[in-house]
Amino acid sequence: MKKRTKGKLRFKGDKTELILHEKNMYMALAVTALPLMLSNFIIALLDIADTFFVGQMNNASAAQAGIGIAWPVINIMLAFNNGLSAAGIAVISRMFGEGNKKKAAHYGGLLLMTACAMGLTINIMLFAAAPVLMRFMGADGDVLTEAVVYLKISSFEMLPLFLFSAFCAMRQAMGDMVLPVIFSLIAAVVNITLIALLVVGFGLRARGAAIASVAGQLSILPFYGKRLIKGGADKLAVRGGLHIDKKSLALLFKIAAPSVASQVVGSFGFIILQAIILQAGQEVSAAFSIGNKISNILLAVVMALGTSMSAFVGQNTGAKNVARAEEAYKSSRNMSLILTVAGLVLLFPVRREIVGVMSTDKETVRAAMEYVVVVLLTLPGLAFYQNYMGFFNGSGNTKLSLYMTFAWIWLFRIPLLLSFNRWTSFGRAGVWYAMAVSNIAVTFVGRLLLRRVKYE
């Protein structure tokens, strides 16, 4: 597993030795997180490409608003995916920390079967309920048409996406961020190529963007599927673990339930947010979507560190090395803050050019410029938020993740948004201020919850 060559460490297969024993924590986190940073960054750019290609068409704001309205609904379904993956990383990384690879493979099998069942169920539900859901969100006219089409087609992405997330959770739990990145890059290339062809070439608007996303996920399914069943050089295959064990399933669900609930609470909150924001006009709704896509460029780096740190915390907790688990959290937090500030320095001067690329609608651009300034300046707060979430999930304290998400959305964002809209004359600026204040306020909640972490 670990070889010394000319005074240097070389790591083969999984990164367990690196996670458990490397003295330079900053270097260890950087090595494991860098591939994931690249993947997240490309995905963030892909979201911008989505908006860019759709934004070049006539009446672009309707298509952009339609996609923006559909996304919170998709996200609430993906909450099950994200929560399940977070639980998988927590449980499987702990098995690696204990040195029990056979048990890790068993939990991987349970994770895969659960992901398959959830993905298929959500596919059917989204397709059937798309028109009702989009009307509930407040969409009508052209926005409703675009949103329903986008949501119906995107529903077919659920099953392959759930399976891929299960695969990624297993690899990330053992510290391997490289293989998931390779597959993500392949899917991204297929996706962006088809977006350009279908949206610009054939004028399919939101329909083309959705088809491209589904095709991107399906293109990599055979490759990671084979790896899941047969295993690779690390011999971690789930074929022997594809059976139901009530005790193991109960443990997985015990950790997954609060994690899923956390994601659902957040995603449902974003549905309410989007519905409220849409009342200010489709240009404001489109501007909100554009601003979030730009901020996600920086958050991609932070989220990669949070995911990597979660594996460090899980494995070291399993190895009974709590001090190292806490060191991983502090190092990730410091790196996230430094990288976020550095990213702000780079992005802030070119914010106008980036927004201009993403939309040709003058009013949308004007509103997006206002939001981008506010959201970028408060991004360090979200950097802390992501690190708290990674630490809570990695240590198995997924209930704390639920509490923090609830505070962020339901105690801060939604009440502030409603208050600014009703009792101030801020206008659409009230939307931006509500987002900014919530980004800062939630960090204080995270600090309080940090004291309640338990290692079991």
Image (cartoon, helix red, strand yellow):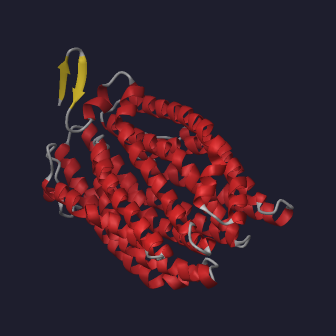
Quarter location, residue 228: bottom left
The answer to whether one can see residue 404 in this image is: no
Count how many numbered circles sit on residues in the image.
0
| Pick the front one: 146 or 324 | 146
Query: Residue 269 at x, y = what percent?
Result: 60, 64
Image point (68%, 64%), residue name? 364
Quarter location, residue 257: bottom left
Image point (48%, 80%), residue name? 149
Position of the C terminus by quadrant: top left
The answer to whether one can see residue 39 in this image is: yes
For residue 4, side relative to residue 145 (left or right): left
| Pick the front one: 91 or 199 | 199
| Pick the front one: 43 or 247 | 43
Query: Residue 236 at x, y = what percent?
Result: 17, 48
Query: Residue 8 at x, y = what percent?
Result: 25, 19
| Residue 345 position (above or below residue 75) | above
Q: Residue furthest front?
A: 201
Query: Residue 411 at x, y = what percent?
Result: 67, 57
Quarter location, residue 173: top left
Position of the N terminus by quadrant: top left
Image point (63%, 44%), residue name? 350
